[in-house]
Image (cartoon, rainbow, N blue to C red):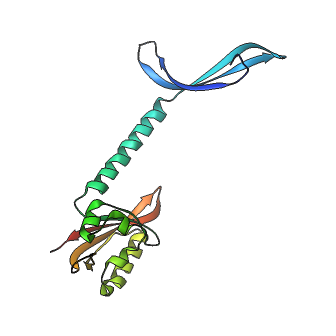
């Protein structure tokens, strides 16, 4: 500040009751002509922002845990049907790796007789209605397996942004 620059920092301040809270501060020089005559500092209480961020992170972590650790195969697909996320159970059921699933369309892992029904279910979920159907899922190695597949809309801020697929082995 004494060199004429504005300085911003995040720190904790103490209330009169002794508790601390997060703030962001900005300190700028006060100039009179070409000399610095003083400084001005503003501080913004960031408590609400910090709490909201922590709540969002906790919510994201809970979802990630449900998705990643579910014993049921789960996929997240873009609205064009491309798999953008898969859990370990989906890779295990397919007989490959998560990377083997990403970038493909979920229909590629169903028998050809199931594609039309699966496409209808996917489109319905893309319009906001969850749909469940039975299908034969292909594996990397071995015979197809009978599964119960549920297509669930992914909604973000009121807009459908993709579709989740949850499968249950019926054998």
Residue 121 visible, this orientation: no
26 lies above or below 147: above
Relative image position of residue 59 (x, y in whole percent): 36, 46
In the shown orientation, is residue 31 left or right of residue 97? right
Most distant residue in the bottom direction = 113
Farthest-out residue, right: 33
Image coordinates for residue 127, horizontal then vertical, percent: 43, 71
Q: Please tell me in which quadrant of the rendered image residue 6 appears.
A: top right
State left or right for residue 128 relative to residue 144.
Answer: right
Q: Is residue 22 left or right of residue 108?
A: right
If the image is split into quadrants, where does the C terminus sit?
Answer: bottom left
Which residue is at the front of the view, 59 or 157?
Answer: 59
Point out the image quarter for the N terminus.
Answer: top right
Please tell me whether residue 15 is drawn above or below residue 68 in the rendered image: above
Instruction: Using residue 66 as the reference point, say whether residue 7 is left or right of it.
Output: right
Residue 57 in sight from this viewpoint: yes
The residue at 23%/73% (across/down) is 148
């Amino acid at each position: 500040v004494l060199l004429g620059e504005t300085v911003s920092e995040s720190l904790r301040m103490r209330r009169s009751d002794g508790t601390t809270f997060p703030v962001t501060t900005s300190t700028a020089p006060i100039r009179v002509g070409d000399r610095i005559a003083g400084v001005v500092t503003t501080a913004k209480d960031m408590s609400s922002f910090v709490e909201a961020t922590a709540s969002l992170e906790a919510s994201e972590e809970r979802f990630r845990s449900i998705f990643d650790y579910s014993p049921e195969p789960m996929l997240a697909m873009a609205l064009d049907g491309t798999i953008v996320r898969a859990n370990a159970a989906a890779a295990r059921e397919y007989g490959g790796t998560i990377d083997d699933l990403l970038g493909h369309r979920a229909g590629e892992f169903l028998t050809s007789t199931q594609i039309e029904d699966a496409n209808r279910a996917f489109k319905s979920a893309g319009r906001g209605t969850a749909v469940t159907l039975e299908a034969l899922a292909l594996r990397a190695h071995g015979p197809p397996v009978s599964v119960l597949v549920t297509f669930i809309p992914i909604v973000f801020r009121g807009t459908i942004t993709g579709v989740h697929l949850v499968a249950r082995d019926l054998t």
